[in-house]
Each structure stands twice: as C-alpha cells, then as structure tokens.
Image: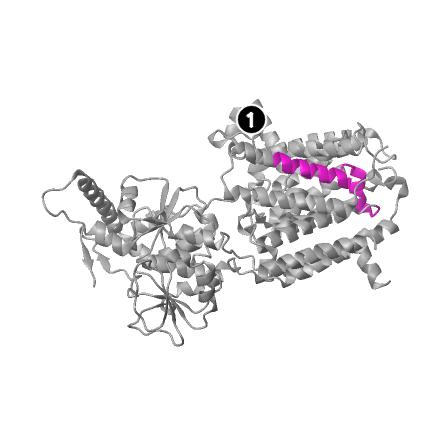
C-alpha cells in the first residue's frame, strides 16, 4: 500500500490526531496560564525561611530585581528596581520583565499579605528564584502568650 | 424496514461522549440501577410510609422531606427511556415483541427475564452500581471499584453462560 | 482498513500522546491569571479581627474560621469555633472538597500574614470564592481583641459596641483556651471539618 | 472550568433537566448500538456477537481520554468528579450476582430500560424483576449491611494503586482494549451464528 493511500484511508484519524497535537502544542507553549500541579509550585512557600528574606539577613546572590508593589511608595535599593503597582504584575510588559529576569526577583510591599499573594500567583506561573522582601520575617511567630489563669496575655517580645 | 445498528465503535464513541458530558456538566457518571432503586423507595414510601421511616435502609431517602422521585438518577432513567424510544422510532425498531431463541417458550423467556432482573438489580445495589454506574462510569474515572466490578460481572457471566446456553443458542 | 483497525490506530496514537503528557492528576490553578490577580487584590478578601470577633460572638453559622497553623500550635491556643487545617499539608486534605462546605465565608488565619495569604491565593486559584483572610493573623487578634482596654471616659456608641464585642470575644476565647487539655481535645475533635461528599454513583 | 455543577449553584430544575438530557443521550446511544436486543447482548458470552465489549470499552476509553484532555487543558477539575468508592467484598460479590443476572435476563438495567422503551416485552418483565430485586435488597439490607459496608477502601484510583500516571494507565488500557477488539472479531467469525445475527 502506498503512503498516499494510507493517508487517504485514514483521513479521519489523522485529522483528529493533528488537531489534538496542535492544541497540546498551543497549550504547552502558551504563557498565559498557570502551570500544572499547584502543589509543586506552592511547595517552597511551606518552608518560608527560604523565600522570605530581609536586607538585614542578606540578599540572595546574583543580579537582583526588586519589584515594588506599592503604588505610591518608592523604595531605595541598590538592586534593579521596578516600581509596579500590584495590579499590573500580569501586564505584558512587566510580566515579561519578571519572567525573563535570570537572577533573583524580590517582591516588596508594605502589606505582607499582598506580597504573599502575588508571590503565589507568580510562582504558579512557573517563576523560580522568587522571594519576598520583608522587614517582618518573624511575622509568622506568635508574639503573645495566652495565660490560662485569667483574661490576660503577655507580649513575649 | 428496520435500519441496521450503528457501528459498535461509533456507538461506543457516542456513549463515551455522553458519559464525558455527564462528567463535565454534573461531575458524575451515568447510572441506571440507582434510578430503579429510587422508584422502589418512592413506591414503598407511598404504600407504607411508617415502614419506610422505620427501616434503616429507606429512612435515609426520606430525611428532611426529600422526594426520591425528584432525583438526578430517577430523572435520568426517564431520559433513558425517552432516548431509547427516540432512537427506536428513528430507526424504525418500535415493535411489541418477546425476543427469544426459537428453541424456548415465551413463558420460559419471561421467567428468566424476571429472575435476571431480580439478580441483576440486587447485585447492583450491593456493588453500588450496575454495568453503567459502577463498571462503565467507574472505569472512566479510573476507579478501582469500576474495574473490579467490571471483571466480576463479565467473569461471572462467562462462568454461568454454560448453564444457561439453552436459553440463547 | 476497516473500522476496528481505524479506531485501534487512532486510540493507540492518542493514548501514546496521553502517556507522554504531564498528567499527574493533581490540582492546578484554574482561574485566568489576570482575573485571579484582580480577585486576590480586592480589598473584600480581607476581614478584620473585629469582624471575626463579631462572627464569633454572634455565632454566625455562615462563617467558618480556619486555623492554618500546626496542630500543636492549634492545641495550645485557637480562636473559638475554628478548625485546624495546617498549611503544611494544605494539599493533602484536598482543599477543593473541604472548602466546598456550603459556608458563605471560610476565613483563614495563621500567626501572621504569610501562610494565610498563601492559602488564600491557592484557594482562590482553585476557584473557591468563599475564602477570606483575617488580616494580621493571631498576632493582630491578641493585639486588638485580647489587649483591648477601655481608655478615657467618653466613647461614642459605635466605639462602645466595638468594645462590647471585643470583650465578649475575649471572654469566649479565654474560656475556650483555659479548658483542660483533655476537654479541649474532645471539643476540637467534635468540630472537625465536615467535607461535603461529592454527589454521584448510584447511591 | 468544569464540572459546571460545582462551578455555579444550579437551580434544581436545571440540574434535573441536565439529568434528563444526559439520560436521553445515554438511551439513544445504547439503542443505536443495538443494546435493546437481549440476544445481541447475550452473544457476547457465546461468542457470536461481541458488540458489548466493543461499545463498552470504546465508551470508557473515549470518556477517559476526554476527561484527561479536558483536565490537561484546564477545563475540568477531576478532583471534583465523583469516583466510585471501593468496598472490596460488595464490589466482587455484587459483580458476581450481576453476572448471573445478566446471563439469565439478557439485559443490564440500562439496556433493559432502553429495550423496554422500544416495546420489548421481556425487557418490561426484566424491569419488574429489577424493581423486585431492589425491593428485596432494601428488605434484606439489615442482614447484609455488614457485607455491603465492609472492607471499605475509599475512592481509590487504579493508577495511584499501580503508581503510574493516569495518561500511562490510559495507554495501557487502550493497548489491552485494542487486543480485545481483535480477539472479539476473531471470535465473532469462529462462533458465527448467522441464524441468530440475521434475526436481531
């Protein structure tokens, strides 16, 4: 049987497989979607000490890109600075700059919650070497102690 | 003149797409025996409500004023009947008849049909689904239960096939 | 080629492609990135400790407070009526099913502002729109609710109501966390998160 | 992102309308496949007609492939699709009883309903038997409760048990199915019963 004949007789199969392959190609090379397996991309947020850093404790090696997520505040820093309000992180221009940066990317916001949320979103897009710059690295430590005897609490700081 | 049946692979694809739609729209598979159960539950509920409320089995279907007939599975089997009828009408296969091997009597066929129904649905209640609810839908979601039930059904049917061969061939 | 051969060939090719795809069967974010960003930055996703205090005092049943800290931390001290869902194994417990609990609001809290907001971003990414964060976490709770003291002699009715709520929440919190360990454990076990079962099958 | 039912809280009528439409599609596909004929179904077990295995496996595989692909493209969250729970004893014993019922009655509940809809009188009797079976189960439930609820393993997935990816398992299943289709068509030739197959 000649090749052309095989193709002719299996037209439907070939068309379906080709459509599928094109769809998969588009999906796997497309950038505007979250990666598969959310658990994997959230993994480093569980061990917070690796991703939450402060200037005091020292910044990661390499060419840092600092993203200032606060709209009006401008912070001074000796690394490359990008002032992006948090809602335009995914705008094409800034997003490409973030994803293409080879060195560490540091997120800063005076609201740690905002940095944490943006961190998670960027991480789920597949960004590695992504850090949160915070002067409150001990934020997740309970600073108060509850005393069961009465209605009082004690600040352990 | 009645039409020929669809090519089995095409029909299987169609059935698979229906199953996929059920998964996509409702997050569940297909089912048939469940609907029968709900019919029975509502009949029992209508005939002897105190008995239904007392029984460990029936009572859960009447909790909080639930209506067993207004249920996904029950409505689905009404759909099955409607869909089958539609297909039969389109392919000109609507006809009252008892289908059987010429070697057996009508009574024998009907007795065995009845017994088959009793066994099948009893087993389906135990296994929490029949060929559609447990085996087919189960396999489509890779559930171990689906594969085990499928193997058990077909294996046992082959085992018993020899005993009942006179009914069919 | 007959139909069987055609089907067999087609299925085999597609099956082979499937075998090569990274299908882990695990959860992935499903909301579009741009949309999700807008959602998580929306100020309505944050609730204050005072709001949480009010939910607790009024025993609002449409609200479920969720403690993301470790079980040990949770046992030592927790917000009354909260449920422990440690962030460390947030994925093991299948958040999508647990948080589909019919509550209008599931409010996350941890000690500070990181875990709760990581969890919120994940939950919203998995399209669980009934998730919120208690801003400032347990530290802020202690700071505002537990250490609230009456200062000055002139207060407006609104301040008075706020103060009332705080005092009552503080009392509940203290009662609950002063229970002996054995009793507390029993109480905790009785309030485990009731996951909504998926509907389906022939049951 | 599906399943749609978990995405939006559907009003009851819409949920039930979907049930009706799905049911109609189900019945239509079964009837078109020829499952409204008990002799065609029984042919599976005597070798003269292997439609059952062809339709059954094609359907399962198409749904399996479809759901995996939808999940890959981010359109369907498979964690929100019901997975049958595995009660070891109940699945096996129930399956064996069902097999016996299959060969006696010549129908399974789904195909029985669809045969009934086109006027098969034996299917109507099968349906009555089915109702009786469900009734008997409900009445005997207290005594077999232990068996029915014992050896509970939860909604386990077979690829997780085997430790392979769902895609790879699907591929293996397809290979097995393709082999079975081939054997089935050989059997159809070997055990051919034109007297029966021309009749149905």
User: Residue C5: x percent and y percent?
Assistant: 80, 55
Residue B5's x, y, as percent?
Answer: 80, 40
Which residue is painted at 28% across and 45% down in the image? C51
Residue D155 appears in the figure: no
Q: Is residue D172 magenta?
A: no
Q: Main secondary structure of the magenta part?
A: helix
Residue that mark 1 sits on: B45
* x and y percentages locating residue D96 in the rendered image: 69, 45
Tag 1 secondary structure: helix
Q: Which residues are magenta?
A: D19-48
Q: Is residue C96 something that shows in the picture?
A: yes
Q: Is residue B35 left or right of residue D184?
A: left
Residue B37, quarter of the rendered image: top right
Mark 1 nearby-residue class (10 Å; few <14, some 14–19, many ≥20):
many
Q: Nearer the viewer, residue B130 or C18?
A: C18
Magenta highlight on residue D22: yes
Name the spot of residue D115 as percent of width and height, x first.
Answer: 75, 34
Picture residue at 52% right of the left edge, 60% below the top:
A35
Instruction: Write down the chain letter for disc 1.
Output: B
Quadrant, the N terminus of chain A:
bottom right
Q: Quadrant of residue D3?
A: top right
Q: At 36% across and 43% down in the image, what residue appears?
A: C63
Count of numbered circles on the image: 1
Classify the position of the C terminus of chain A by image quarter.
bottom left
Outermost residue on the bottom side: it is A61
Q: Is residue D72 above or below residue B56?
A: below
């Amino acid at each position: 049987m000649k090749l052309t004949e095989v193709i002719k007789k299996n037209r439907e199969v070939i068309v379906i497989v080709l459509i599928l392959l094109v769809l998969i190609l588009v999906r796997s090379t497309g950038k505007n979607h979250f990666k598969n397996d959310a658990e994997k991309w959230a993994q480093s947020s569980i061990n917070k000490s690796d991703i939450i850093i402060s200037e005091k404790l020292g910044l990661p090696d390499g060419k840092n890109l600092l993203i200032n997520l606060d709209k009006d505040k401008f912070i001074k820093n000796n690394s490359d600075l990008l002032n992006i309000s948090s809602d335009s992180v995914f705008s094409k221009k800034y997003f490409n700059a973030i994803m293409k940066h080879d060195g560490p990317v540091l997120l800063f916001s005076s609201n740690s919650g905002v940095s944490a949320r943006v961190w998670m979103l960027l991480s789920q897009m597949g960004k590695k070497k992504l850090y949160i710059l915070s002067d409150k690295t001990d934020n997740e430590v309970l600073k108060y102690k509850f005393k069961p005897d009465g209605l009082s609490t004690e600040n352990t700081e | 003149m009645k039409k020929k049946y669809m090519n089995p692979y095409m029909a299987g694809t169609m059935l698979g797409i229906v199953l996929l739609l059920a998964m996509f729209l409702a997050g569940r598979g297909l089912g048939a025996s469940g609907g029968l159960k709900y019919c029975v539950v509502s009949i029992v509920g209508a005939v002897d409500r105190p008995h239904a409320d007392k029984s460990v089995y029936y009572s859960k279907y009447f909790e909080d004023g639930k209506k067993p007939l207004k249920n996904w599975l029950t409505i689905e089997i009404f759909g099955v009947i409607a869909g089958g009828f539609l297909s039969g009408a389109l392919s000109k296969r609507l006809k009252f008849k008892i289908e059987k091997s010429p070697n057996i009597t009508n009574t024998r066929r009907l007795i065995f049909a009845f017994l088959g129904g009793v066994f099948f649905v009893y087993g389906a209640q135990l296994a929490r689904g029949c060929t559609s609810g447990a085996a087919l839908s189960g396999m489509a979601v890779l559930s171990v239960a689906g594969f085990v039930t499928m193997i058990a059904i077909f294996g046992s049917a082959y085992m018993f096939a020899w005993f009942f061969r006179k009914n069919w061939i | 080629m007959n139909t069987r051969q055609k089907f067999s060939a087609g299925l085999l090719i597609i099956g082979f492609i499937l075998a090569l795809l990274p299908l882990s069967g695990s959860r992935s974010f499903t909301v579009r990135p741009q949309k999700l960003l807008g959602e998580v930055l929306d100020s309505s996703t944050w609730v204050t400790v005072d709001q949480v205090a009010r939910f607790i005092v009024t025993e609002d049943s449409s609200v479920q407070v969720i403690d993301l800290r470790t079980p040990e931390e949770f046992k030592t001290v927790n917000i009354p009526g909260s449920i422990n869902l440690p962030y460390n194994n947030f994925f093991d417990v299948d958040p999508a099913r647990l948080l589909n609990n019919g509550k209008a609001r599931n409010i996350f809290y941890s000690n500070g502002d990181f875990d709760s907001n990581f969890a919120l971003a994940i939950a919203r990414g998995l399209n669980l729109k009934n998730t919120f964060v208690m801003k400032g976490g347990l530290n802020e709770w202690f700071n505002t609710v537990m250490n609230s003291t009456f200062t000055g002699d002139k207060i407006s009715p609104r301040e008075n109501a706020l103060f009332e709520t705080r005092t009552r929440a503080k009392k509940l919190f203290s009662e609950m966390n002063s229970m002996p360990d054995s009793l507390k454990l029993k109480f905790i076990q009785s309030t485990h998160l009731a996951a909504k079962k998926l509907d389906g099958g022939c049951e | 992102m599906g399943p749609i039912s978990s995405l939006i809280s559907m009003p009851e009528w819409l949920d039930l309308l979907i049930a009706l439409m799905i049911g109609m599609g189900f019945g239509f596909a079964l009837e078109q496949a020829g499952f409204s004929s008990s002799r065609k179904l029984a042919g599976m077990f005597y070798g003269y007609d292997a439609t059952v295995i062809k339709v059954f496996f094609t359907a399962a595989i198409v749904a399996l492939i479809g759901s995996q692909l939808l999940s890959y493209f981010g359109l369907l969250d498979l964690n929100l699709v019901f997975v049958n729970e595995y009660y070891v004893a109940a699945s096996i014993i129930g399956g064996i009883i069902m097999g016996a019922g299959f060969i006696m009655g010549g129908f399974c509940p789904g195909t029985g309903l669809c045969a009934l809809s086109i006027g098969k009188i034996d299917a109507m009797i099968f349906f009555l038997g089915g109702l009786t079976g469900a009734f008997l189960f409900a009445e005997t439930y207290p005594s077999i409760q232990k068996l029915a609820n014992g050896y509970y393993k939860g909604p386990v997935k077979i690829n997780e048990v085997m430790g392979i990816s769902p895609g790879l398992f699907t591929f293996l299943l397809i290979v097995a199915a393709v082999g079975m289709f081939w054997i089935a068509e050989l059997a159809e030739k070997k055990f051919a019963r034109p007297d029966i197959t021309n009749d149905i």
